[in-house]
Amino acid sequence: MRRDGMVDVRNDRQFFQSEVMRLMDRLYGTALRLTGNSADAEDIVAEAVARAWEALPALRDRQAFGGWIQRILTNVYVSEWRRRRARPMTELPNESVPDGELEFSLFRRLHQPFLLWWGTPEHAFLNKLLRRDIERAFDALPEPYRAVMVLVEINGWSYSETAECLGLPIGTVRSRLARARGLLQRALWSWAKEAGVSAAAGPAPGRRLS
Amino acid sequence: MSPRPISCEEVLARLFAYLDGELRDVEQAEIDRHLEWCRDCFTRAEFERRLKARLAQAGRASPPERLRERLKLMMARF
Ligand SMILES: [Zn+2]
């Protein structure tokens, strides 16, 4: 698998091109959730692909290509793109979590005795939740929370991998993740109410649950 | 040795760490055991698990055609 001959270079290129095309939705989707906009996401994917090609000889296990290029893409975002933005993103004015945010639970809102007459409202809710609702909720998160969510929920990384990549203590990853989940569930809940999704799962419109 | 029985409060406090695979084996087993008999916690865990799966799907998006073209051009020069 070394790139020291013509045949190997050609094999490498074919392998690389087909893998990139196969993983395209995932690479672009991750970049889109990280940046929140298409133009930046496209640049990040392009940069990640260029770097991955440079680094390909160092990849020993080709089965690991997907996770490997995902990591390169995330690093491009964290180490460069993010730094180039005007606001430094590692500092938050107040890391402490207001009780309401942390405590907020969609499940508790949905799983209430009077709603249970209709079956399982929380499942009805999930079934009616649109992909677009979830994307909006992600994109509305403040960047430091969004970054942690993307690394944990989308990349599927452990807290310690996430902490290392973002240069944060693991306790900060835990607290940001908890806060991010509270914010995200709250956003899903309020949009669901607006769209009448929760009404479909239970009470008549206008009945206040919050 | 069977896992220590734990309360619903303990399960909820560690539920996300559990779903994220961040607990030690023994803690993971305590929650697994609890979820086998407690319907309330099981229902809650299932909801959060399904929501997590939906969130993971937000990491896939169909790229605009111009990005595909851009990458094809770029990779053709490799
Ligand atoms: Zn329980």
Image (tube, rainbow, N blue to C red):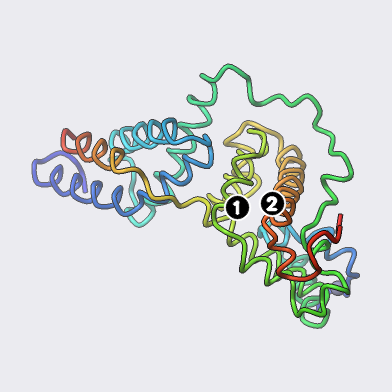
Amino acid type, residue under disc 2 in the picture: Trp
User: How far from the left and from the top, in percent, is residue A46?
Assistant: 34, 34
Q: Ligand 1 falls in which quarter?
A: bottom right
Please identify the residue farthest to the bottom as the structure is shown.
B37
The quadrant holding residue A70 is: top left
Q: Considering depth in this image, is A165 or B77 the residue closer to the camera? A: B77
Asked whether A75 or B46 is in front, the reply is: B46
Judge left or right: residue A64 versus residue A134.
left
Mark 1 surroundings within 10 Å by alpha-carbon count, few (fewer than 14), some (14 through 19), many (20 or more): some
Q: Position of residue B21 (x, y in %)?
A: 66, 60
**Badge 1 amino acid:** Asp
The residue identified by callout 2 is A191
Looking at marks 1 and 2 on the same chain, the residue that comes earlier in the sequence is marked by 1
**Residue A89 left/right relative to A99:** left
A195 sits left or right of A49 in the view: right
- Dot 1 falls on a residue whose secondary structure is helix
The answer to whether the residues at label 1 and label 2 have Cβ atoms under 8 Å apart is yes
* Label 1 sits on residue: A133
Is the C-beta of the residue carrying label 2 under 8 Å from the nearest atom of ligand 1? no
**What's the chain of the residue with tag 2?**
A
Q: Nearer the viewer, residue A171 or A179?
A: A179
Q: Nearer the viewer, residue A207 or B6?
A: A207
Q: Secondary structure at mark 2?
A: helix
Check residue A39 in the rendering and tell me which mark sits there, or answer none. none
Please give the chain letter of the residue carrying mark 1: A
Where residue A138 sits, quadrant-wise, is top right
Q: Residue at x 76, y 43 (%)?
A: A179
Residue visible at 82% across and 80% down? A117
Expressed as whole percent of the image width and height from the top left, the position of residue A84 reads 51, 19
Image coordinates for residue B29, horizontal then vertical, percent: 75, 72
